[in-house]
Image (cartoon, grey):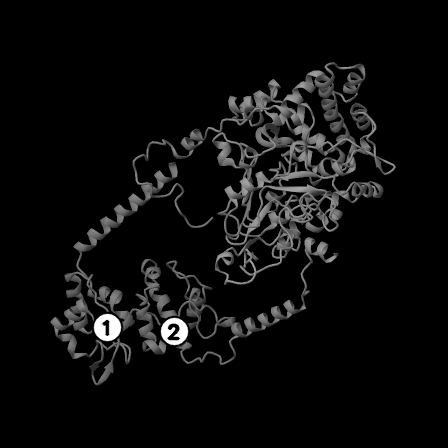
Amino acid sequence: MDVRAHMSMLFHLDKCIGCHTCSVACKNLWTDRKGAEYMWWNNVETRPGTGYPTGWEDQEHYRGGWEKNWVGVELKLHSRPQGLANLFYNPALPELDDYYEPFTFRYEDLFNAPEGEHQPTAIPISAITGDPIDIEAGPNWDDDLSGSNIYAANDPNMADVAAEVREQMSEIERVVFNYLPRICNHCLNPACVAACPSGAIYKRGEDGVVLVNEDKCRAWRMCVSACPYKKVYYNWSTGKSEKCILCFPRMETGQAPACAHSCVGRIRYMGVLLYDADLIQWAAEGPEEELFDRQNEVILDPFDPAVVAAAKQNGLDDGTIAAAQNSPAYKFVKEWKLALPLHAEYRTIAMMFYIPPLSPVVSTIEQGLVRLDISPDQIDFELFQGLEKARLPIKYLANLFAAGNEEVIEKILRKMLAVRIYKRRQSVEGFIDDATEALIESAGTTPEEIEAIYRMTTLPTMQERFVFPPYHREMSAEAMYGDPLARKGETGFGYTDAPKRGA
Amino acid sequence: MRRSMHLVLIVGAAMAVTLLSSTVGAQEEVDGREVFLANCSGCHQGTGLGVTGSFPPLAGNENVQDTAYVKAVIVEGKSGPLDVLGVSYDGAMPAFPDLTAAEIDALVAYIQAGVFIPAETGGLEPGDAARGKDLFTGSDRLENGAPACASCHTAAGFQALNGPALGPDLTDVANRYGGEEAVAAALVSPPSATMQPLFTDNPIADQERADLAAYFASISNVRPSGGPDILLLGGALGAVAMFALMLLAPRSRRMGFARQLRSQR
């Protein structure tokens, strides 16, 4: 058992209001630079939709992630010999139009335009060339438009949803949608790391953050293609790849990453997950239907004395173990089994988790009419019994979060509905009837668990949502540079790593 | 840590030896011939005959008997047109300010004695041009471990694509230096700044010098083949072939996902 710690973020999709505050916080902090205009390390997509970059989930086009074949698990982009042969030829790269051409507006026209009959306008110009452009796309194009016939109609996750269900979805005024905030998944089996010919990308040992070493990056851009989530970006100005760094400088000082900290809906949780690095390959090679179960095996129980002992042997300190025991990520993922990674079938073992959304408002269509005549509690039970009538098709959610396995999603939605129904009975009626108790049991939960889920979902404090281990950077600084006071009072010129020839 | 200790020890030992040997050397009598071969023979040639048009001869030159003049030239250098024995020379001679007074005295005495190469050639066996070629190309190693000439030089087109081009072509070096003996003498202390560090520590043995000089003399009349420059020609043809391949490659890029969707509109 090789126990390591991983910082994992958890997205409670039921709470996301699609305000893009996370994206803007991230943009302002990290990608407001030349060459990074088009990058959104954090973005929020309206689903159904093709997301950003357009159609990133279509791996036949983009060839991201891993696939299982007779060798074992191999990059979908290329085998090793192919990678060498095609080093200079990588047609699977997304092009600028797949992201969008970044733009701004010529604001000075508002002040400098000669006097005329009409109000001056600020026309859009490309942020790359400065020439006027016709804006065709943006990072959240089609925002709130789940039924757009260009993008949403081509959502790869809708491909195998039954035709009549898709028909129904577009009938309800094309307004059924949910939001999907996305950052780098900091995978356990990262395809970007495997694809880099320069060995410039690595996964940090202490918290699992996947980082690009900008000194070693040689602009091959294999990472851009290999990442199935398209979360590595190429900076056209510096000629280096960049990606979400999980705000590690913030985490190291005990602050939540900017996206999580600024989240208006408080949908984001962060905590330590202990994992067994020896099991990663086994988990990545599993048959498709077992992928998530195996990932769950890789994540270890921080209360298990054997795990704690192995963790200590691996150099994890008591603070990290305590943080793992307190981790909201652990509770949602492993204890309550409510959270799933995005697209487990990519076999990268994504370590950011999503709690799938319940359908927006409970109502189903019967013979073309919305039934308004039944009481709310009946509707509750009706939806619980007939999840296939939920507005967001189970198949669709399963394609997003469970490699197409509807049972997994149904189990989670039942449990979440049970929480909702139980708490509604409790607070509206003041008592729990037998039918509700039976329902809770059939959802596989208990009143205690429901209380805990309810509390963590609706009323968590900042300290409950974000549980960071002490990073003890002062100790690693001492280990690397010796006495931190040795150079105090000096001018500060010089190198920590002296320049030298060769690699 | 341990390795750096070793390094310090080795470097320290090497420095001690160098220091010791240099102090010992200073006490010995200076050999004017050695000073001459180390500093002067590159231009004035071991024969003392100089190079026509550039470097004036010292043998038979009346001016060298003027001790003060010679010393001044050695210390300060000299340049510009100079007529010696009715021939005009316009090379430039650098100053040699690092020579000690003892060295200069010995050197002047050696020059004034006027006994240059002929005194030495007697010691050299006649060279074997075939072996000289092997030494030149590196088929035979130089005795003291210096790199073969062909590491940098080419001569008489001994190799396809004209051979190395780092140093000058040595095909007519025997003509330029004024004969086989001059080459053999020059090799005692090769004249260029690039060669000096290589051959000072690993001098070319006497017999090797003779062989090499014989080889250079044997090829001194070879004209480099007048054919086209194969490297240039091959490069040009290769470039044309690459451009042709590029023309054959599919011209249109794969259509991006977003553009595909928009084109369905």
Chain for mark 1? Answer: B
Whether callout 1 and callout 2 share a subunit is answered yes
Specify the amino acid type for callout 2.
Answer: Ala
Q: Closest to the observer: B45 or B54?
A: B54
Q: How many marks?
A: 2
Q: For numbered disc 1, what is the local secondary structure?
A: loop
Density class for disc 2 (Cα within 10 Å; few <14, some 14-19, many ≥20) is many
Left/right of residue A366 with respect to residue A42 in the rendered view:
right
Instruction: Tell which of B69 and A55 is nearer to you.
Output: A55
Residue behind mark 1:
B116
Which residue ends up furthest to the bottom in the rendered image?
B86
The CA distance from mark 1 to mark 2 is: 19 Å
Residue A332, quarter of the rendered image: top right
Q: Quadrant of residue B60?
A: bottom left
Residue depicted at x 76% and y 19%: A440
Determine whether A457 is above or below A215 in the image. Answer: above
State whether residue A143 appears in this view.
yes
Residue annotated with mark 2 = B214
Eyeballing the image, is A316 above or below B86? above
Q: Secondary structure at mark 2?
A: helix
Where residue B10 appears, as percent x and y from the top left, is 33, 43
Q: Count neighbours of disc 1 (C-alpha within 10 A) and say few if under 14, some if 14 to 19, many if 20 or more.
A: many
* Mark found first going from the N terminus, 1 or 2: 1
Q: Position of residue A58 (x, y in %)?
A: 71, 47
Above or below: residue A501 compared with residue A417: below
Q: Amino acid at mark 1?
A: Phe
Q: Chain of mark 2?
A: B
Q: Position of residue A484 (x, y in %)?
A: 36, 32
Up-down: is B237 above or below A140? below
Q: The N terminus of chain A lies in which quarter of the figure?
A: top right
Place residue A169 in its image quadrant: top right
Q: In this rendering, does residue B122 appear at all?
A: no
